[in-house]
Amino acid sequence: MSDSEKSIDLATKEMLGLACNKNICTAFDRHETMEPECGFGQLGICCRNCVMGPCRIDPFGEGPQEGICGATADTIAARNLVRMIAAGAAAHSDHGRDVAHTLLTTSEGKTKGYGIKGKEKLLNLAKELKVKIENRKIEEVAHDVAEKCFAEFGQQHGELQFTRRAPKKRQEIWRKNRFTPRGIDREVVEIMHRTNIGVDNDYQNILQQGIRTSLGDGWGGSMIATDLQDVLFGQPEPVRSVSNLGVLKEDEVNIIVHGHEPTLSDVIVAASQDKELLELAKKYGAKGINLAGICCTANEILMRHGISVAGNFLQQELAVITGAVDLMLVDVQCIMPALGKLATCFHTKIISTSPKAKFPGVEHIEFSEEEALPIAKKIVRMAVENYKNRKKESLNIPKEKMELVAGFTSEYVFKMLGGKYRATYRPLNDAVISGRLRGAVGIVGCNNPKIKHDWAHIELTKELIKNDVLVVTTGCSALASAKAGLLVPEAAKKYAGKGLQEICEAVGIPPVLHMGACVDISRILTTLCNVLTEGGLGEDISDLPVAAAAPEWMSEKAVSIGFYAVASGIFTVLGLPLPVMGGKNLTEYLINSIENTVGGKFAFESDPLKAADLIVKHLDKKREALKLKPMMYGE
Ligand code: NFS
Ligand code: SF4
């Protein structure tokens, strides 16, 4: 495959060409050497759950159709699938747990570098969680809110608190089908139990637990992560910034933060503005300290501080190859182990910080909330001191960079649409009802070298906004849209249909709204609940003309997200199939009959234009059921 077929992003193509000239391998190349990938794995029909096996089912029906224990293709594929959900939900939720811990220790005055910046959010949460507010210090309230959220992880029975944010009808569906999560951790553990050899062997019953676990992510762990981050680091508001590798600066110390948890990156932002360190940078001949993000950490500090974005998942190695990164610090999730070896070819220092995530050949400086700011300063100092080791001849910063606006939240949409004094979702609902807007679609998720980098995200997004669909986006998809110039108000005139254009112009928003990191997909759920409460668009999420898509997904986290979206009643289109196709009944269930139970279902479609078509048809079906007006500017 030539470099131009690997990505639509100019900076990425340029860096891939350079990597090739230098004989440096990236994920794009390693993907090619891996082909053909294992068919059993892709179809989900190999099982290693006990040592009588590994067993594989013959997909052509000629060889074995059962494992040694008698497990069928459907059973094996379902067990593998829900283990992916368990891993994905665990990752998001453990992130949420860590944030709860930071809030708790901060409320006890034990941290250095954090405060409670989102007071309004905290008070709203306190009300929701029935924490007493009157005559109490903000720290006391924060303490009890953190404890209540903590308890959600270990809860053994009852229902997760935030599932009550869902419409009544949805809650009933969950209860009736045993989908309501009892405790976040409990559901993950139960997946591991049920998928042991000889426990749950009915694919639908296995999926029931998969759904329950995923809901514990979306309406539990991820929601806690989002809400408590807003309490600690402040609620995002729309902010302008810049994206792509061109944000790296030739004459400044470049630090990249990569990973997921803003507990680390937020104090790095503060440390990079430290006077003493800035002086030191100048002493070494640098004009300043330039911070940029990759992956979801990028989203977190982008929307709270306007820090620029270096790139998305498949650009992490390319950032190092620019030779301009003096230090890259990483915490958890989506960090390629390849970075360690790659960095040895450059002056770049990679620093791991989480006790949960170490990398061979990478220096580890353990991060702790208690000493957050001093540790952050130490790391920034290392970057500054490494600036002098930069080799001019290996410096290759691509020019590409793009303006963007990021940081829309469910609360902000509320303010923005109603004006300062009239907070309401009414204009949004009316736009859908009157046929100016067809509906809304969440486009989210990763990059995957199996699909031309950023291409599927951008094609799908453009096609939908052309059809008067408001797109909301998170994660690496949001970063793809940023780089493609879709996150600015001016993009409406260029790419959006007439109805969407009118709304964007009236309110001054881009046609594609950046709503944060992947844990912030919980913001999309909350927004949908608010839209329903505003009225006129049905009673349940499955009534709404909305859909979701992950055109280039790769992570287990995306599987968990896909499931809680479907189980919340949302039609969800994946650009690559779930690894289940070897289980014929299971596949049929996921792309079809699951809809009878939850009102949402999956579709697998790798062609973004066909995916857009499926989505538009789905939105129109929902509009028809709600008896909404025909689209104002034609179909
Ligand atoms: Ni989401 Fe964020 Fe990106 Fe995929 Fe990874 S960064 S949590 S998993 S690759 S979107
Ligand atoms: Fe084979 Fe069954 Fe063991 Fe899986 S659990 S490896 S199918 S014997």
Image (tube, helix red, strand yellow):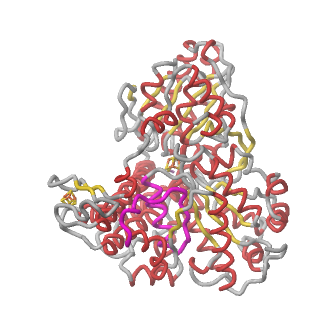
In the rendered image, residue 310 lying in the magenta stretch gets the answer no
Can you say which quadrant of the picture contains the C terminus? bottom right
Q: Position of residue 206 (x, y in %)?
A: 31, 70
Identified at 41% across, 49% down, the residue is 105
Q: Is residue 38 left or right of residue 282?
A: left
Q: Is residue 276 visible?
A: no
**Number of marks in the rendered image:** 0
Residue 194 lies, in percent from the top left, at: 24, 66
Q: What residue do we see at 71% from left, 87% from top?
A: 627
Q: Which residue is at a point 69% across and 31% down the rendered structure image?
A: 246
Q: Residue 453, located in which quarter of the rendered image?
A: top right
As for residue 574 lying within the magenta part, the answer is yes
How far from the left and from the top, in percent, is residue 207? 36, 70
537 lies above or below 463: below
Query: Position of 611 compared to 196: left or right?
Result: right
- Is residue 457 in sight in this rendering? yes
Question: Which residue is farthest left?
Answer: 52
Where is residue 461 shown, x and y percent of the image?
Answer: 68, 57
At 74% from the left and 46% from the top, the residue drawn is 485
- Left or right? Give the position of 233 relative to 500: left
* Ligand 2 lies in quarter: bottom left
* Relative vertical location of residue 495 with respect to residue 32 in this rendering, above or below: below
Quadrant of the rendered image containing residue 208: bottom left
The quarter of the picture where the N terminus appears is: top right
Q: Which residues are magenta?
A: 556-585
